[in-house]
């Protein structure tokens, strides 16, 4: 019995369609800048919000109606849910998905029982992947929900928590490899602190560095060659997370010799919690050569926490797609909807509305970004703005031939700098609006 009998496969109907369950902009086979929209966007559905989110919040219980759930935490229920997830993703036309180990299968009374539960559901995931052609974008281990990780996982003061986390990641790497996962993500759930008076920061960071190196060693041992991704987030659940933003993560990767195997997974709502825009985080990571994947969502400007809403703002998706195109695309990463429907959007149908809206917003962003790049007006403005670096003293500084003494001689001779020119911010913001 299908879980969504009233929904047919979502199709592209073009910009004039008034059907909310159709794509107006996402035409998966249409080629833009030499690549299909499907290959540019590599959309991915997250298991945790979409199939495990129940709508509970700190003030109230779950609200979601999910007729396929039998209300138990059994392996059978988890296996059935996996089949429902694939029906959903197929009807949506999403080529990838992502999960935490604990989203897909229930924890048992011991680590070995938990691993057996995981295997039993992975069997179904594998069958469904083969049947549908949908692939695993990334796997990750949930090392933040269980109370054993209250002080963190690899950064816990309790060495046993580190050991448990290692066993968990070992298993999850094996499963991710088994399912052909293209990446493996570390989001530092509770890797941070609440209070510096009880924290040995240096020791915790060294342990996290050790943990990541052990993961790379084990991946090499079993022949998992997917990309490792660290996902920056500044706070929540801890008051300070060590992976606070892209710059902090990149410094960590360099300090512990990890840049060969690791890149970053940048999430919009995490960027804004860090006091940056998504565009800033993507530009920073991209020029460092470490842009791996994105978690697509948005926060709420009125709220200061991780609301994980579906992105529908063309301005945001245009900025993101400008960055992805600038840095050569997101593969083998993807556009992963780490987003949840609101508690009030409790019907199964809302899962479709949310994803269709998010995918279409990104497809529109891709189209807008590509036409801006084709016209080249922004790019030319920036190039012109830095023209003083292309010849003369600027070129000498960039190439390393001018030292402080030479620069002093140059300036003493010249007396004053070339007149500055306007940055034209308002003109450019107006220009960008022309494309929206
Ligand atoms: C939490 C978050 C996670 C990661 C995976 O804010 O974004 O869901 O994406 O652990
Ligand atoms: Co995320």
Image (cartoon, grey):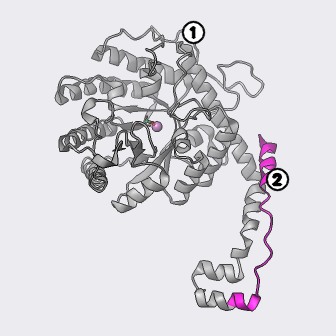
For mark 2, what is the residue?
427
Dot label at residue 222 = none
Q: Earlier in the sequence, mark 2 or mark 1?
A: 1
Distance between mark 2 and mark 1 Cα atoms = 48 Å
Few, some or many residues within 10 Å of mark 2 (<14, 14–19, 20+): few
Which residue is rendered at x = 19% and y = 44% of the image? 159
- 362 horizontally vs 184: left or right: right
| Quarter location, residue 181 | top left
Magenta extent: 410-436
Few, some or many residues within 10 Å of mark 1 (<14, 14–19, 20+): few
Between disc 2 and disc 1, the foreground one is: 2
> Is any atom of residue 369 visible in this view?
yes
Secondary structure type for disc 2: helix
For mark 1, what is the residue?
6
Q: Is mark 1 within 8 Å of ligand 1?
A: no
Which residue is rendered at x = 74% and y = 49% of the image? 372
Q: Does 303 appear above or below 9?
A: below
Can you give x and y, in whole percent of width and height, for residue 64 in the image? 48, 13
């Amino acid at each position: 019995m299908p879980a969504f009998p009233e929904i047919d496969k979502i199709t592209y109907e073009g910009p004039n369609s008034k059907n909310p369950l159709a794509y107006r902009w996402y035409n998966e086979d249409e080629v833009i800048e030499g690549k299909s929209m499907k290959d540019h966007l590599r959309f991915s559905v997250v298991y945790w919000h979409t199939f495990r989110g129940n709508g509970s919040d700190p003030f109230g219980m779950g609200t979601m109606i999910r007729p396929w759930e039998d209300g138990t935490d059994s392996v059978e229920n988890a296996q059935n849910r996996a089949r429902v997830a694939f029906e959903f993703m197929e009807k949506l036309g999403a080529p990838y998905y992502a999960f935490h180990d604990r989203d897909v299968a229930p924890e048992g009374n011991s680590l070995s029982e938990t691993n057996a539960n995981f295997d039993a559901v992975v069997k179904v995931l594998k069958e469904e992947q083969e049947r549908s052609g949908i692939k695993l974008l990334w796997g990750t281990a949930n090392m933040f929900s269980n109370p054993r990780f209250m002080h963190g996982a690899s950064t816990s003061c309790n060495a046993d928590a580190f050991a448990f986390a290692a066993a968990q990641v070992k298993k999850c790497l094996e499963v991710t490899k088994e399912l052909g996962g293209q990446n493996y993500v570390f989001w530092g759930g509770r890797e941070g602190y609440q209070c510096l008076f009880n924290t040995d920061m240096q020791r915790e960071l060294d342990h996290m560095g050790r943990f990541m190196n052990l993961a790379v060693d084990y991946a090499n041992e079993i022949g998992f060659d997917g990309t490792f991704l660290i996902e920056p987030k500044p706070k929540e659940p801890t008051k300070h997370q060590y992976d606070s933003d892209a710059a902090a993560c990149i410094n960590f990767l360099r300090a512990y010799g990890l840049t060969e195997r690791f890149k970053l997974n940048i999430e919009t709502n995490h960027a804004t919690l860090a006091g940056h825009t998504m565009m800033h985080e993507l530009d920073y990571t991209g020029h460092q050569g470490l842009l791996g994947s994105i978690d697509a969502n948005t926060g709420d400007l009125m709220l200061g926490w991780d609301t994980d809403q579906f992105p529908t703002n063309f301005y945001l998706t245009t900025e993101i797609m400008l960055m992805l195109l600038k840095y050569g695309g997101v593969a083998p990463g993807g556009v992963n909807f780490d987003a949840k429907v609101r508690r009030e959007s409790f019907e199964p149908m809302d899962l479709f509305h949310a994803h269709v809206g998010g995918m279409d917003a990104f497809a529109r962003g891709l189209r807008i970004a590509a036409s801006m790049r084709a016209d080249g007006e922004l790019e030319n403005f920036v190039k012109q703005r830095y023209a003083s670096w292309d010849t003369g003293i600027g070129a000498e500084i960039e190439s390393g031939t001018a030292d402080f003494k030479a620069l002093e001689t140059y300036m003493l001779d010249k007396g004053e700098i070339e007149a500055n020119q306007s940055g034209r911010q308002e003109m450019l913001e107006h220009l960008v609006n022309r494309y929206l």
